[in-house]
Amino acid sequence: MSQETNKIKTPPPIVFIIIVGLIALGAYNFIPGLLKGKSSDTPGAIANRVSLGNQILVTSQTTAEKQAGVTAFAEGNYQAAIQKFQASLKQNRNDPETVIYLNNATASNGSSLKIAVSVPIGSNPNVAQEILRGVAQAQDQINNSGGINGAKLQVEIVNDDNSPEVVRDVAKALTKDQNILAVIGHNASNASLEAAPIYQQEKLVMVTPTSQANNLSGFGSYIFRTVPNISLMAAPLAEYAVKTAGQTNIAICYDSQAPDNISFKDEFVASLTAAGGKLVPTVCDFSTPSFNPDNALADAVSKGAQGLMVAPHIDRIDRAISLARINRGKLPLYGNTTMYTFQTLKDGQKSVDGLVLPVPWHPATNPGNTFPENARQRWGGVVNWRTATSFDATQAVIAGLRQSNTREGLQQALRNPSFSTAGASEDVKFLPTGDRVGKPILVQVKQVANTGYNFVPLR
């Protein structure tokens, strides 16, 4: 073979230019698509919404000491963080975020187990803190009594804004963090229904303390809730309206974009009919931009309504209150569980006087239980049902983790028909559907001497 035929011919420079150009073009088109596909799947996409103690999420509860505490926590100086969080709580003990961060900092120096709680801090900070108080109280209680088989409980706080879009990213990120053994949340049913399929598929226990939509009942083997089935909540209210108050013709104003409100309305109507009452057919939807309380009330009155049941989304309670103000006591008011908020009392005042609604828990119904008094001492005031059911959700997870500190083992413990643990009133037990075993309490807004308007149990 000649030397001439052994030579490899070098392509002209223009070929290299074309090849490099094609590679660059492919990378330009491929990499952004890759990054776009990955962005919502990584914890980085929600980094500003998640905190174990390294940043403040509840900005309304900020002190200089708390800020110094999160700075120290982020730097890994847990002893300094502990001191600063303790100093902040001396100024403001009614701050569950700081209590959780203090416990997390204390747990950072030894064996620990980690869960998450996802709440709507951005869209509804009051409700978010009600839930956080229950989780913080259960965490405080277990960590101060030796932990879970010697391991302290850490709680990662997530702000999901009750937004289905955000919740998708949250659920994906939490399932990928193998250190997280369970999720307490979410708050609104539309948020929980968005997250539930992800938790179920990835086998991460979710215990919602507040979501009541029928769609969650029996959703999956990893999905639980510490509120009773909504049919159990709606039936006593309908029976009270018809048989006790003698109001058979009831109009309804609800939120068609909130699954739990749809469920409550359907169950209420079924129970109303069974009790001998009748639904007054009106068009009243809190979710529509054109909602007009004057027109809604006029329509109900003109069609012979003797009572009005309101079921707003938790982030649109102001619309139900505006309807109550227009009503001025003309029609007796009934409500769903969502209406049990400080906002209802503060903004509604005399307009909501007499409002009757069901709740899964009230501090006055079980005086023998230590939870209400412990909560009053811890937070400096009376807590509501969301704090109690969040405490119960955390208690259930703690009891399950005592049996097994794996995701699968926790799920099996909670699914065991004999599972039971002490709650804020009754023991926490789950039906095969994942619903809480329990029954509601009817409460009524009344003016109480020296304390203003409050929710009082109907005897």
Image (spheres, helix red, strand yellow):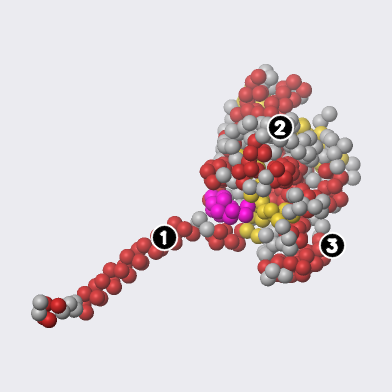
User: Tag 1's secondary structure?
Assistant: helix
The N terminus lies in which quarter of the figure?
A: bottom left
Looking at the image, residue 112 lies above or below residue 213: below
Residue 321 shows up from this direction: no
Specify the label residue 90 is tagged with.
3
- Prevailing secondary structure class for the magenta stretch in the rendered image: helix
Give the SS element for disc 3: helix
Residue at horizontal 74%, vertical 67%? 78
Q: Label 1 is placed on what type of residue?
A: Leu
In the rendered image, which residue does mark 2 sit on?
A: 418
Between label 1 and label 2, give the one nearer the viewer.
Answer: 2
Q: What stretch is highlighted in magenta?
A: 167-180
Query: How far, Cα to Cα, is label 3 from label 1?
Result: 49 Å
Give left or right: position of 140 versus 212: right
Q: How many marks on residues?
A: 3
Mark 2 residue crowding within 10 angstroms, few (<14) / some (14–19) / many (20+): few
Q: Which percent across, then down, holds residue 432?
A: 63, 31
Residue denoted by label 1: 34
* Chain-order first, disc 3 or disc 1: 1
- Residue 28: horizontal and vertical position, in percent? 36, 66
